[in-house]
């Protein structure tokens, strides 16, 4: 598996090897031993999956505070997304910056988002399915978020058409109003 740090080095793009023949392909999406060798020693506890019916659906930016902070491993099983991680680790040299990667069913790439980051994605195609593993259980009281269109972050979501948001995501605070978050 190829592991490539993005512009924020703790966010890592994983490209599993695909083994193809006339039937199609096979890939190993997670192997604890292999990834531990690459510095990713994670014990995942929950798998999540979402379906977004139309291109331009934004989910995020979401995070959970301590003691329920979560690292995530995100992949697309149908369609394509721009996957975004925003560094919220106070004292980090990349605090308040974002990085992104395009993930698709076709490219098979995955994004590892460590604890201390807000995470979100924008679908680039209709009927996009996203699967992700997390290393902490969901806890509603620990849930936080940031508006996807925050002008201070100026995230390029890779989509120019109308955006679909949940009612919850429409009222998230701006980055400057989030306040300190413990991870």
Image: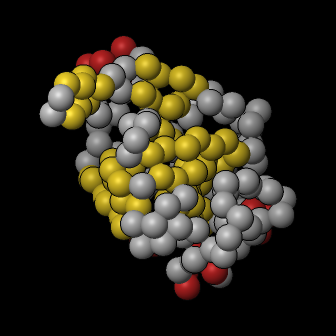
Is 117 situated above or below 52?
Answer: above
Q: Quadrant of residue 177?
A: bottom right
Q: Is residue 43 above or below residue 145?
A: above
Q: Is residue 87 visible?
A: no
* Looking at the image, residue 35 lies above or below residue 177: above
Which of 83 and 116 lies nearest the eye of the viewer? 83
Residue at 58% from the left image edge and 25% from the top image edge: 5
Left or right: 70 as drawn, with respect to 167: left
Q: Quadrant of the N terminus?
A: top left
Q: Residue furthest left?
A: 23
Q: Nearer the viewer, residue 32 or 53?
A: 53
- The percent position of residue 79, horizontal first and vertical second, equals 42, 55
Q: Is residue 168 above or below residue 60?
A: below
Q: Residue at x 29, y 34 (%)?
A: 29
Instruction: Report if residue 54 is visible in the image.
Output: yes
**Coloration of the structure image:** secondary structure
The outermost residue toward the bottom is: 167
Q: From the top left corner, tell me how far across and down residue 54 is, in percent.
A: 48, 72
């Amino acid at each position: 598996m190829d592991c490539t740090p993005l512009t924020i080095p703790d966010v890592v793009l994983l490209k599993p090897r695909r083994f193809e023949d006339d039937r199609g392909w096979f890939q190993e999406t997670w192997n604890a031993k292999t990834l531990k060798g690459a510095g990713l020693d994670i014990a995942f506890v929950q798998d999540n999956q979402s379906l977004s019916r139309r291109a331009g659906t934004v989910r995020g930016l979401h995070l959970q505070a301590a003691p329920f902070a979560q690292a995530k491993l995100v992949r697309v099983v149908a369609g394509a997304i721009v996957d975004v991680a925003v560094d919220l680790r106070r004292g980090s040299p990349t605090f308040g910056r974002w990085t992104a990667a395009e993930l698709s069913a076709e490219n098979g790439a995955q994004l590892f988002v460590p604890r201390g980051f807000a995470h979100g994605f924008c679908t680039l195609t209709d009927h996009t399915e996203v699967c992700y593993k997390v290393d902490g259980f969901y806890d509603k009281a620990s849930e936080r978020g940031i508006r996807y269109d925050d002008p201070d972050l100026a995230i390029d979501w890779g989509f120019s058409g109308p955006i679909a948001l949940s009612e919850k995501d429409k009222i998230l605070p701006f980055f400057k109003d989030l306040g300190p978050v413990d991870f």
